[in-house]
Image (tube, rainbow, N blue to C red):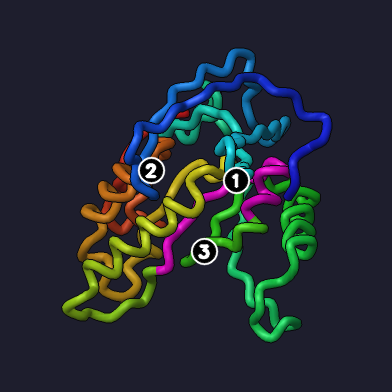
Amino acid sequence: AGLDPRAVVLARATLELPAGTEAGAPLNLSLPVPGLPRWSPAAPRLGALIVRREGTGLTHARRLGYRQVSLDAEGLHLNGARQPLRGVLYQPHWPGTGGVTPSPAALAEEVAAMRRLGFDFVRTHVRPAPPAFLDACDEQGLLVLAEPAIGWLDDDPGLAARLHHEIQWMVARDHHHPSIVAWCVLNELSGEAYRYGEELALALAAADPDARPVLEDSGAFFGGRYVPAGGD
């Protein structure tokens, strides 16, 4: 989705790269943004981070939203207030497309249908949702519980490495979506991944720069264990 032409610049900064900086090297820049509105289902306000490399014509833009989320024994809290959830399971098959992911417009309509029916929360079941679906959740204020594609994997000498790869890939691709308010590692006890449940939950929490809560499994087979990380 493109940027709103009515957008205004809230803050800007310049970072000079040291001589000899290698391609792909991590860069750190602290940028205070006063007056940044918070994202919520009632008011899904979005902004964008635009990075431009002077003298090259290279520009990269990423949409984002600012909100605070935490999880405790009382439930999910969004922007400091308890957030009651009216949720639905999302397990699409798309038979009309031959299994091919539908267009962004079709995915946005699926999100719109959930909102029209009164839902404000969706569990994207056993695999990361298409990016266009998450974009629509950002735009329409639908909260998301996201899961990696690790259900029903058999035991194998490379299983642990595969599991860690899947959660790292998911976080790297999707962590900028404000609609994602929590992660869930396991679908009940499917496959052999459950043997690594606690290890994976801690690794996922450590990988997420936005410090979302992480549920160990969807069915509370481990007593409802979760990593109660909370952050912005």
Where residue 213 sits in the image (x, y, percent)?
A: 40, 40
Q: What mark, if any, has residue 178 been given in the picture? A: none
Which percent across, then down, holds residue 212? Answer: 42, 39
* Callout 2 touching callout 3 (CB < 8 Å): no
Q: Nearer the viewer, mark 1 or mark 3?
A: 1
**For the residue carrying disc 3, how many other residues have a C-alpha within 10 Å: few (<14), some (14-19), or many (20+)?**
many
The numbered mark at residue 58 is 1
Residue placed under numbered mark 3 in the picture: 125
Of the image marks 1 and 2, the number of the one nearer the N terminus: 1
Q: Quadrant of residue 83?
A: top right
Place of residue 14 in the rendered image (x, y in percent of width and height, measured from the top left): 52, 24
Q: Is residue 78 left or right of residue 137?
A: left
Residue that extends furthest to the right in the rendered view of this protein: 6
Secondary structure beneath dot 3 equals loop
Camera sees residue 148: yes
Residue 70 position in % (x across, y down) = 44, 31
Per the model, the C-alpha gap separating discs 1 and 2 is 27 Å
Write the start and end of the magenta stretch as one range.
134-149
Residue at image position (57%, 29%) is 66
Q: Secondary structure at mark 2?
A: loop
What amino acid does circle 3 point to? His
